[in-house]
Image: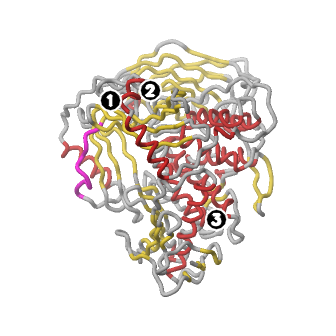
Amino acid sequence: MRPTPSRRASATGALLAAAALLAVGVQSGAASAAPDAAPAAPKQQAASAADPGALPAQLSPAQRAELIRAATATTAATAAELGLGAQEKLVVRDVVQDRDGTTHTRYERTYAGLPVLGGDLVVAETKAGRTESVTKASAAVLKNVDTSANVTPAAATRQAVAAARSEGSKETAADRAPRKVVWLAQGKPVLAYETVVGGLQHDGTPNELHVVTDATTGKKLYEWQAIHQGTGNTMYSGQVTLGTAPSYTLTDTGRGNHKTYNLNRGTSGTGTLFSGSDDIWGDGTAQNAETAGADAHYGAALTWDYYKNVQGRSGIKGDGVGAYSRVHYGNNYVNAFWSDSCFCMTYGDGSGNAKPLTSIDVAAHEMTHGVTSNTAKLVYSGESGGLNEATSDIFAAAVEFYANNPQDKGDYLVGEKIDINGDGTPLRYMDKPSKDGASKDAWYSGLGGIDVHYSSGPANHWYYLLSEGSGAKSINGVNYDSPTSDGLPVTGIGRDKASLIWFKALTTKFNSTTNYAAARTGTIAVATELYGATSAEVKSVTDAWAGINVGSRPGGDPDPGTVFENTADVSIPDNGAAVTSSVTVSGRSGNAPSALKVGVDIIHTWRGDLVVDLVAPDGTVYNLKPFSSSDSADNVQTTYTVNASSEVANGVWKLRVQDRAAYDTGYINSVKLTF
């Protein structure tokens, strides 16, 4: 939706994007910054049906509860098998199962009784009880953490309240007393406080800001938002059948007792449950308060049915319990959001209270944030935040196609019915995300530093490419023309297969720190489990990732390019002047490539202090890495991609590095340019 003047997303999981922000991606362990190399290309098979045993099993709430009980009873044995330390314990958060009996158990960790943020992991176990794989949010070893804090809880609270005020909150105290935790999401474990501050943000969206403070130094380590932005005569879907209670209330007794409430312009509480003297709801106009209620209730029912009937998940948590919806939030509120704290979806009425944000895809988008929160729990910042947003867009499209409503046909557009822009254009485009003017079509090294609604673009693009393929086509009367970043075609495998692959990766491979490179690894692994390593599906999954500049195609790049490198060490002054490491390029004709690879190896004890630039021979500066006080991990060892096609290739290129904060030191180990 329209950007708002905020440096972070206006709502976690809200459909509306805020202005570009500076956010540090939580990337550690399996979530490495550089994409993995593609496997060699095996002989490809024709498109095929999925291996039935690898498909998700449809568990009843009782079956899921029994699996959780069984896993909880063996957490000590599992921790020992994984080689966890004596002070570490596992806590079961979720269990899903494949039809062949393979069980995927998702755990949180504690250390000396303290919650470990970024310590989540997934263990896959065969029906016979053999551990098949372990996926961790962080590969760092959890040990030698001093649990005695030097910083007081009051100091942590002051810091969190100040951060919330910058987002518009008028709160003067935290909603909850700071809790002591171990912060593992960025490498080395650190004792910290997690503080939560409420209130409202600049645009009226509820605020639930989580701030993590180093309990030894008082330094802010991280922050994120936890607000994820009968007969019904609906505004967007025509006349539809709604699940209601016999006493004429919007209570869907067949879908976990999902209820829909009228906030009547309020911004807190539950509001009033929609009720009436008959089972007819709304008249199709925004002036009738029941209309928005009917749309939201219908969208929630469709989303429930999709997840249950297609993906085998009974409700957001898999426990058969329904969430609830609130409509008519605020006055002229142009947004919608999901909140974990209320386990609910909330919808504003749009500009002039004339276009409620209650279309099918918006409802599915917000409800899917709940599914993500209760499965992978992708942190709503950096690249993982972009993948969180993309997951909601992906299943918004899947639900819309599944609904097959003649008034709102399935498409790869987001928010096309609610007219946020006021000119009839959609909020986002999945075939070419950059058409909205802000989203990105492909991955690049700075993607994690922009608003999550825009960094979701490459994953949305990947889903479209995998579903429909590249190039021009028309689907349900909408024209698409999807490009690829490497200029090579992608063959689609169909939306149902693409959705299945993403859903299974979300529930069995992704974790809180998953970034684009790790998402590629997870989806290729899932496609291999479902269709086989030599299948057309695996090739298309890999090609689609290459099509958004994440990894290369099977068989590798036929032209690996020419490498120019400088391996001389250059010391970086602590909080001092910038230094450079030069690479002379010669023997090349014409300009530099549009995907110039810049391999950077910098040894440093607090990489957030560093600003790293590539300086072209004519002096043009390409920022590779911005300063970030909260990025406490060691070293910068990754490959950046730069569009340098406007630069002459030959000449002296420089890697420029400046340390902009005190205490930590390091040096440039090497720089490598691949033309």
Q: Is residue 643 visible?
A: no
Viewer-nearest of discs 1 and 3? 1
**Residue furthest toward the top?**
568
Q: Amino acid at mark 3?
A: Glu
Give x and y (percent) for residue 623: 52, 35
Badge 2 or badge 3: first in the primary sequence: 2
Q: Is residue 414 located in the magenta-colored stretch of the structure? A: no
Give x and y (percent) for residue 21: 46, 48
Whole-angstrom CA distance, mark 2 to mark 1, is: 15 Å
Q: Which residues are magenta?
A: 172-181
Badge 2 or badge 1: first in the primary sequence: 1
Find disc 1 in the rendering and name its residue.
88
Find disc 3 in the rendering and name its residue.
416
| Secondary structure state at the residue bearing disc 1 | strand
Find disc 2 in the rendering and name its residue.
139
Q: Residue at x 54, y 49 (%)?
A: 59
| Secondary structure state at the residue bearing disc 3 | loop
Q: Amino acid at mark 2?
A: Ala
Q: Nearer the viewer, residue 190 or 537?
A: 537
Viewer-nearest of discs 2 and 3? 2
**Where 226 falls versus 279 (above or below)?**
above
Q: Nearer the viewer, residue 64 or 431?
A: 64
User: Badge 2: how crowded within 10 Å, few (<14), some, or many (20+)?
Assistant: some
Q: Amino acid at mark 1?
A: Glu
Q: Residue at x 67, y 37 (%)?
A: 530
Q: Is residue 178 located in the magenta-colored stretch of the structure? A: yes
Q: Is residue 302 visible?
A: yes
Whole-angstrom CA distance, mark 1 to mark 3, is: 48 Å
Give x and y (percent) for residue 452: 51, 49
Left or right: 477, with 423 as reference point: right
